[in-house]
Amino acid sequence: MPVADSGCLYQCLWQVLLTSVLPIDNEMLKWITGFIVGGGAAATVQGGSVLTRLASTKMTAGTGNAVVATGELASKKWFIIKN
C-alpha cells in the first residue's frame, strides 16, 4: 500500500494546500478555515476511496481490490504528470 493512501496524510495535504491559497489577511482565521474546509475536502476524497473499495470487495469477494488500487495509483500518477 502506498504511503499516500493514508487518510491523515491526505487531510494534512488538503489543509496546507487550501490554507496557502486562501485570500484571508488574518493568519489565525486563515489557518482555522483551512483546517475546517481542507479537512472536509480530505474526508470527501477518502470517503469516496473507501466506498469504491467497499463496493469492489462486495462485488468481487475482495479479488477486485488489486484492480481498484492499481487504478487509484495510475490516476494519481497521471494527475501528477499532467499538472
Image (cartoon, helix red, strand yellow):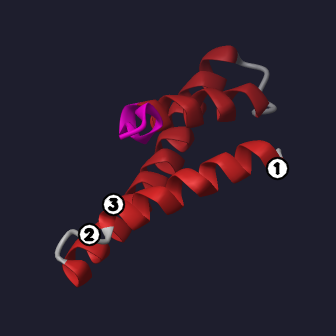
Instruction: Work out whether 31 lies above or below 68.
Output: above
Kindly check if marks 2 and 3 are in contact, taking CB atoms under 8 A apart as contact. yes
> Which residue type does callout 1 highlight?
Lys
- The outermost residue toward the bottom is 59
Residue at image coords 59%, 55%: 74
Residue carrying label 1: 82
Residue at image coords 47%, 40%: 39
Q: How many marks?
A: 3
Q: CA separation, marks 1 and 3? A: 25 Å
Kindly check if marks 1 and 3 are in contact, taking CB atoms under 8 A apart as contact. no
Q: Earlier in the sequence, mark 1 or mark 3?
A: 3
Q: Give the secondary structure at mark 2.
A: helix
Residue carrying label 2: 54
Q: Earlier in the sequence, mark 2 or mark 1?
A: 2
> Which residue type does callout 3 highlight?
Val
Q: Give the secondary structure at mark 3.
A: helix
Residue carrying label 3: 50
Kindly check if marks 2 and 1 are in contact, taking CB atoms under 8 A apart as contact. no
**x, y percent for residue 12:** 50, 28
> Which residue type does callout 2 highlight?
Leu
> Is 57 left or right of 39, judged from the image as shown?
left
Mark 1 or 3: the one toward you: 1
Mark 2 or 1: the one toward you: 1
The overriding secondary structure of the stretch rendered in magenta is: helix
- Quadrant including the N terminus: top left
Bounds of the magenta span? 1-8
